[in-house]
Each structure stands twice: as C-alpha cells, then as structure tokens.
Image (spheres, grey):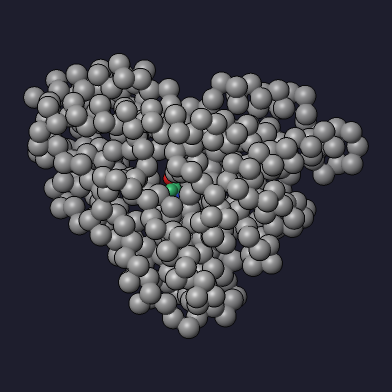
Amino acid sequence: MYYFDHSATTPIHPIVLERVHQVQKHLYGNPSSIHQKGRDARSIIEKSRNQIASAIGAEPNKIIFTSGGTESNNQVLWSRLGEKKNHIISNKIEHPAIIGTLKFLKNHNIDYDLCKVNSKGIISLNNIKNNIKSNTGLITVMLANNEIGSIQPIKKIVRIAKGKKIAVHSDAVQCLGKIKLNVKDIGVDFLSLSAHKFYGPKGIGILYIKDKSSISPYLIGGGQEFGLRGGTEDAASIAGMGLAAEIAIKNLNQKIKHLNILESKFIAGLKIIYPKAILNGNKQNKLPGLISVSFPGFRSDILMAKLDRLGIYVSNGAACGSGDIKPSTVLKAISLSTELNISTLRFSFGITNSKSQIEYLLKKLKEILI
Ligand code: PLP
C-alpha cells in the first residue's frame, strides 16, 4: 500500500487506536455523571485537554472539544450572527468549511470579503487592510493551505487586526505535527484543529478560544464544554486525540526533516522522469511533504485512477463526479490556467512513508507518463 494522501486524512496511530478501544471498553461513563464511572471519564477528558493545550501552547481552559475542523470553523463564523460588527474578511483559498459557511451566512445579515492571494498562494496584506470596514469584526485566514501547503503570515495579520480591535481566527487543521504551533506566539483569538489530520481518530477536533465571552455555542445542549458545545463528550475519541497531539509534537524537527527528505527525493526524481512537471505554490514557506504538481497534457482524474489501480493513493485538487472534472478554486485563485488546473495532483507524504515508497511512486509515474 502506497498512501500519499495525508492531507486528506492520516491513518490512526496504532497506540492511539489501542487507547481509543481501551477507553471505549472500560471508561464508558457519562463525563457529566457524578459517580465514579462518570468521574473516570471526566478525568480522561481533562487529561486530553491538557495534552492538546500543551501541544499548542494554550491554557487548558481555552480549549473546547468539537467534532472536527468543520464544526470549529462554523462555530467561529456563526458566532458573528447578531453582532454589530458583522463583517468578516477571509480569502479565496480557504476550505469550504469557511467559504461555504460565509456564503450561507450572507443570507443572514453577515457580510464578507475574500482577499486575493498571489501565485504562491500567499494572502495580500494590503488587500486585507483595504477590506477593513468600521463593522469588521473578524478576520479568518488558514494557517496553511490544504491543496498547495502555503503558510500564511498570520502574525502580521494579527498585528493589523489588533490595531483595529478585530478578532482573528485561523484554521490550522493541516498544521499540527508539521510545523511548530503556539497560539500565544501567533496571537490568534481562535484556532481550529482536527485529530484525523495528525494520526488521531476521525470526527473529533478542538477550537481554541482566547476569550470565552467572545463566542457563542454552535450546538446548544446540556452545557458541556463550558457551555460552549452541547452534547455528551466522546471520551474515547477525545482521549485518542490528546495522545495523538502528544505524539505529533514529539521529535517534531525529526518528523519535519523526514518529510522534507521524502519531498526532495520526489521532486528530484520527478524532474528527471518528467521535466515538464510544474510545481505549484510556495517553494519555501510551505508545509513539509505536501506537493502540488501539474502534469501538462494529462488529466488528473485519469492519472489518479491509474495510480489507484497500482495501489498508489494521491488526490487532485479538482472535485470530480460523474465523469465531469471541476477545476479547483484554490488553483484558480493562484492563477493556474484551467488546463493546468485539471492536470494537477497533490502528493502529501506522512511519517510512515519511506524513501523506497517514493522510488516506487516515481517508477510507476514514469510508466504512466511516458
Ligand atoms: N480545514 C482544512 C484546511 C481541512 O483540510 C479540512 C479537512 O479536509 C477541514 C478544515 C475540515 O476538517 P474536518 O474533516 O475535521 O471537518
């Protein structure tokens, strides 16, 4: 099996899986129950809150558990409903959990502007400044992009926003375990993470909230998570996520180095087997191990299907269904022609990939391309 699609999701770490099973089997109490079974589940949850907090340099009481990146992003945006400062600034290469939500909220008295990005996928700071209005209440910019890996200058964005008393949210779903992450250093007000992107379980994530009075619950229920996220907590998934976060930041530099070695090997090989390949996005300030490549003259869905038949799993930015291929909005935003857009594959390497797997990938790509 040759899995090179870690930006879509990662396989759960074996130790994390074991932990999830263990909690599911033995610690089934409702964390809100006051008896021993409940208290046991509660202490598992609080342990995980501590693990996540220390992975991102936050205080534990500023983390709430959600169902993942989509929900965390939604909660931040929906919280602007009913606020006087109902204008939001974002950009053209955000995940659909941001752009789709903004489009929806436009029908509910939320106004927004999407800033441009340059050909490397970096947001224009001037464009942000020019879009600020007297009623701008939030700037939401992802820390790193999921299709091309470009890392945004969030600290600079925070500096612009703070001068105008505007809150900043960052979707950092792609980042834990790939770059250093410290919410205090970055200075954001809100940050979203999702466990399945860092070898944790699916359907669980967090939202970091600097000031709890600045946000409202998205799911209203039994008052869980400081009253900011109703619903009985999934202690098993939460425990798995906490452990996955702890593992993700352990030996981070070594992990980054490993991903960079795989990436360099792949790029060097690609240049030999197919010199016409075009690398998209930022070459320097990007996520390690995520490479967006256009193969002029080839359709990405066909390339993907051929690789799939060989047990090699990658993805294309383009969403395709029923034979149609729809260009990726991210690649469009970095000014890639439609022809190249629909010829683009994303390779995203992970910690269990090896050099010999990259060699196999290159060998098979060569057979397909030549
Ligand atoms: N944001 C980004 C940048 C992502 O890559 C993803 C996942 O694809 C999400 C948000 C959604 O996260 P989740 O799958 O946890 O809802």
Instruction: State the image coordinates of residue 179 (x, y, percent, origin top left).
Output: 45, 42
Q: Is residue 335 left or right of residue 311?
A: left
Residue drawn at 42 percent across, 63 percent down? 156
The one nearer the camera, 281 or 299, is: 281
Which residue lies at the image location 14% right of the left edge and 20% below the top edge?
Answer: 367
On screen, residue 349 versus residue 16, left or right, reads: left
From the top left corner, tell me how far across and down residue 177 is, in percent.
49, 37
Which quadrant of the figure has residue 369?
Answer: top left
Give the x, y percent position of residue 320. 29, 42
In this view, which residue lies farthest toward the right?
35
- Outermost residue on the bottom side: it is 134
Which residue is at 63% across, 31% downward? 243
Residue 115 in the image, given as x and y percentages of width and height? 34, 67
- Which quadrant of the structure image shows residue 361? top left
The N terminus lies in which quarter of the figure? top left
Residue 292 seen in this snapshot: yes
Q: How many marks?
A: 0
From what the image shows, is residue 297 above or below residue 311?
below
From the viewer's perspective, tell me whether residue 307 is left or right of residue 196: left
Residue at image coords 60%, 75% = 82
Camera-side residue of 283 and 148: 283
Q: Which of 239 and 321 is in front in this view?
A: 239
Q: Is the C terminus in the top left, top right, bottom left or bottom right quadrant?
A: top left
**Relative vertical location of residue 159 with respect to residue 285 in this rendering, above or below:** below
**Can residue 108 be seen?**
no
